[in-house]
Amino acid sequence: MSSRQAIPAVSSGKSPTENAMTYYILILFAVVTCQATPYAFAATEAAPHSQSEEYRIGVMVIAVAAAIKAPEKAESLETIARYGTLTAHYVMIRGWLAEELRGVESQWQATRETELKAQHELKVLFLRRAIRRIDLE
């Protein structure tokens, strides 16, 4: 018999969905950065002050994350549509929105508190509209 001890869970004060989204964004950023790594040094040496592809992707990720966090803002849907309809980024943003939707729908269905349920419903409707918008354009 082997003696196994349970590894204690690390609590960051965030909900499991927030932790999952944080990890998802970090993994997504790491994948994009790793794919662009061979070109990063050449771009930095050739034009140190110009915007590199990595920088533009970082700006895009931050803008989309901010739009997802604030579905009540009118410009949020436009931000997602602007980046999500670009052929190079459609799959990444569509997948991100789909995973976010799945998590929020799960929270929405599990929530009993009326105010929190309304917030989740607003976000679910927003994410569905955003996915439909980038799929149709």
Image: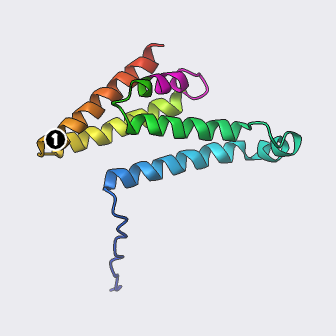
On the picture, is 121 further left or further right than 64?
A: left
On the picture, is 87 further left or further right than 106?
A: right
Q: Residue at x 51, y 25 (%)?
A: 84
Q: Residue at x 38, y 33 (%)?
A: 98
On the picture, is 95 further left or further right than 100?
A: right
Rendering coords of residue 74 (x, y %): 39, 24
Which segment is the magenta one? Answer: 78-89
Q: Is residue 84 magenta?
A: yes
Which of 116 and 137 lies nearest the eye of the viewer?
Answer: 116
Q: Is residue 66 magenta?
A: no
Which quarter of the figure has residue 58? top right
Which quarter of the figure has residue 45? top right
Q: Secondary structure at mark 1?
A: helix
- To which residue does mark 1 refer? 115
Q: How many numbered callouts?
A: 1
Rendering coords of residue 52 (x, y %): 74, 38
Which of 83 and 109 lies nearest the eye of the viewer?
Answer: 83
Rendering coords of residue 102 (x, y %): 31, 38
Rendering coords of residue 110 (x, y %): 17, 45
Q: Residue at x 40, y 36 (%)?
A: 68
